């Protein structure tokens, strides 16, 4: 055969020079995948604008109320947590984060890329773990920027009526951290469900239902119902952002702060653990 | 070296792969043939550890593939050229794979050059033709410079130039001492590329042998005879125990004779003073041998009460 050796002759080197399998190579690989999709920066930019915008709108509404109430009500103001962290804005963030978390795996399943990935890295559990770490890191960074932005924008607006508070005000830091971590918690839940379900539409419906719709089915007026409600991510976020304790006369059961942090930790932990377990044993 | 031993895969009551055993040796191109649904892709997936076998085992270079934490330096595989993310560029796709295996990124440029995609490196894969995706898949397989390569239907969607290129590439990879395992339903492709064949039907092994041995299995080894006195000769040959088929239109017809060798036909024609214009032994094509053997296997299986 007259074939000429083309540009890069692939000499048959036995696989002796193989470097050790390092987890950080997998992290770098997953980061390339995230970075190389055009949709990633767009989604993040639009989400950031929307969430911070919703804080600005809420703060402006309270700015008007305070202005209309007149100088008589002027007193040292407390932190207005739901002006900085609006439920509408942060539930949207939950929606986006869990969807993008799910897409990191579901897009590989739907295109079949997952097979190429698993042939390159037969240690499947490590692949899922690397995806989880990259997703968590990305959304922690995005969540922190959004949370800090929400706070600064809302307080700057409220400062017009001398109603803003500094970062060091009691309760602010907890609200800020809880809101920053909301995004990675939801992204990891979406990722775990994505590995479990594998189909795009079914994963989206399930994750949105679980994170956003399911909590509304359980009221806080009955003990058992409140107990279930308090295990939900959105309830934990509200409790951690809220800077007042349970009122003694209300017929409501209020979640505890440590309990809410545990809810924050358990959801992603269980989702990722199940994902790693299931991906090892199932045919790809 | 790929060794498959009593490999079995059942999906519910359906048996996709049934006690399959064969060996694929280095330094040769081995073709993997079977009609649609024969279990080729399932077998390749089990060799690659993507699907767990119901029974039996497959090893690559002596160990199960899944025992490697990273795979690209051990086996290069192209299962389906569409198994890529259309939103990424070819370079990003290969970079992510190279990085996961600790392969230096200059290797990405090398393999893109080698498959002729250097110009398209920064273009999104979504805009690639199937032939270009096949080239990208081959680039993926070559990335880790592995001793074992597996390709599932690699020439689908390629233009004639691409087919020629890929054929030479496979020959060269085998000449370098690598194990090249190639599934295809294009028999003609195998005839010009493969040294060895593994043929399966309904998940079972039909043949594992060299290409000439396989072609020789066909019982339809026939002799083509051209003569102006076709009807007369046909009668003589039939009387001698051959079966004769008339091919072509009246006046230019030829006889396709099975059951008698060419020298015997020549003697009979001479004895009967019949002029011959042509006497050609037609070796069965791989295609014919394949059709015949898989048809047998299908009939055999369908006739079996299960």
Image (spheres, coloured by chain):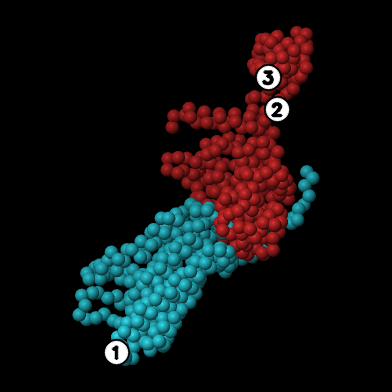
Do tags 1 and 3 sit on the same chain? Answer: no
Disc 3 target residue: B248
Whether residue A278 appears in this view of the structure is no
Disc 1 target residue: A73
Where residue A122 appears, x then y in whole percent? 55, 58
Q: CA distance from mark 2 to mark 3?
A: 19 Å
> In which chain is the residue bearing label 2?
B
Q: CA distance from mark 2 to mark 1?
A: 104 Å
Q: Colour of chain A?
A: cyan
Residue at 44%, 66% (x, y): give it.
A96
Q: CA distance from mark 1 to mark 3?
A: 107 Å
Of A211 and B13, nearer the camera is A211
Picture disc at residue B283: 2
> In which chain is the residue bearing label 3?
B
Residue at 77%, 15% (x, y): give it.
B276
Closer to the camera: disc 1 or disc 3? Answer: 1
Q: Secondary structure under badge 2?
A: loop
Closer to the camera: disc 2 or disc 3? Answer: 3
A145 is higher (above) or lower (below) than A213: below
- Chain in red (letter): B
> In which chain is the residue bearing label 1?
A
Where residue A61 appears, x then y in whole percent? 35, 78
Do tags 2 and 3 sit on the same chain? Answer: yes
């Amino acid at each position: 055969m007259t074939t000429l050796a083309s540009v890069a002759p692939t000499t048959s080197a036995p696989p002796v020079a193989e470097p050790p399998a390092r987890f950080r190579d997998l992290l770098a690989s997953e980061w390339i995948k995230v970075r190389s999709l055009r949709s990633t920066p767009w989604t993040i930019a639009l989400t950031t604008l929307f969430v911070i915008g919703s804080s600005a709108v809420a703060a402006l509404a309270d700015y008007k109320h305070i202005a209309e109430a007149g100088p008589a009500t002027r007193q040292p103001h407390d932190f207005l947590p739901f002006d900085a962290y609006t439920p509408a804005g942060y539930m949207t963030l939950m929606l986006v984060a869990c969807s993008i978390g799910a897409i990191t795996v579901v897009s590989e399943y739907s295109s079949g890329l997952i097979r190429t990935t698993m042939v390159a890295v037969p240690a499947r559990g490590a692949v899922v773990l690397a995806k989880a770490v990259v997703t968590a890191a990305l959304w922690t960074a995005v969540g922190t920027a959004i949370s800090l932005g929400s706070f600064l924008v809302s307080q700057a607006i409220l400062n017009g009526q001398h109603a803003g508070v500094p970062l060091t005000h009691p309760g602010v830091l907890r609200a800020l951290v809880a809101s920053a971590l909301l995004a990675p918690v939801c992204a990891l839940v979406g990722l775990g469900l994505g590995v479990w379900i594998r189909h795009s539409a079914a994963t989206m419906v399930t994750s949105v239902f679980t994170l956003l719709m399911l909590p509304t089915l359980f009221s806080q007026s009955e003990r058992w119902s409140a107990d279930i409600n308090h295990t939900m991510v959105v309830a934990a976020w509200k409790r951690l952002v809220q800077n007042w304790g349970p009122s003694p006369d209300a017929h409501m059961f209020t979640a505890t702060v440590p309990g809410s942090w545990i809810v924050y930790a358990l959801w992603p932990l269980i989702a990722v653990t199940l994902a790693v377990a299931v991906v090892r044993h199932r045919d790809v | 070296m790929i060794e498959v031993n009593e490999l079995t895969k059942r999906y519910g009551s359906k048996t996709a792969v049934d006690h399959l055993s064969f060996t694929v040796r280095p330094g040769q191109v081995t073709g993997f043939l079977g009609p649609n649904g024969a279990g080729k892709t399932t077998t390749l997936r089990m060799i690659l550890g993507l699907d767990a076998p119901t029974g039996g085992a497959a090893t690559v270079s002596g160990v199960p593939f899944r025992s490697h934490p990273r795979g690209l330096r051990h086996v290069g595989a192209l299962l389906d050229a569409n198994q890529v993310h259309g939103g990424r560029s070819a370079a990003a796709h290969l970079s992510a794979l190279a990085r996961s295996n600790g392969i230096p990124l200059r290797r990405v440029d090398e393999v893109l050059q080698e498959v002729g995609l250097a110009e398209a490196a920064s273009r999104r894969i979504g805009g690639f033709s199937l032939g270009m995706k096949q080239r990208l898949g081959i680039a993926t397989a070559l990335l880790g410079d592995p001793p074992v390569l597996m390709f599932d239907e690699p020439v689908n969607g390629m233009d004639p130039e691409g087919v020629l290129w890929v054929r030479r590439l496979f020959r060269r990879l085998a000449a370098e001492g690598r194990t090249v395992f190639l599934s295809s339903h294009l028999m003609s492709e195998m005839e010009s590329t493969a040294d060895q064949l593994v043929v399966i039907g309904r998940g079972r092994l039909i043949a594992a042998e060299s290409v000439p041995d396989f072609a020789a299995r066909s019982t339809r080894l026939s002799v083509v005879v051209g003569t102006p006195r076709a009807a007369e000769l046909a009668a003589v040959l039939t009387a001698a125990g051959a079966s004769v088929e008339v091919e072509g239109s009246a006046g230019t017809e030829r006889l396709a004779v099975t059951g008698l060798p060419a020298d015997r036909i020549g003697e009979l024609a001479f004895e009967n003073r019949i002029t011959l214009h042509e006497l050609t032994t037609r070796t069965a094509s791989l295609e014919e041998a394949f059709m015949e053997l898989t048809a047998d296997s299908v009939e055999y299986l369908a006739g079996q009460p299960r």
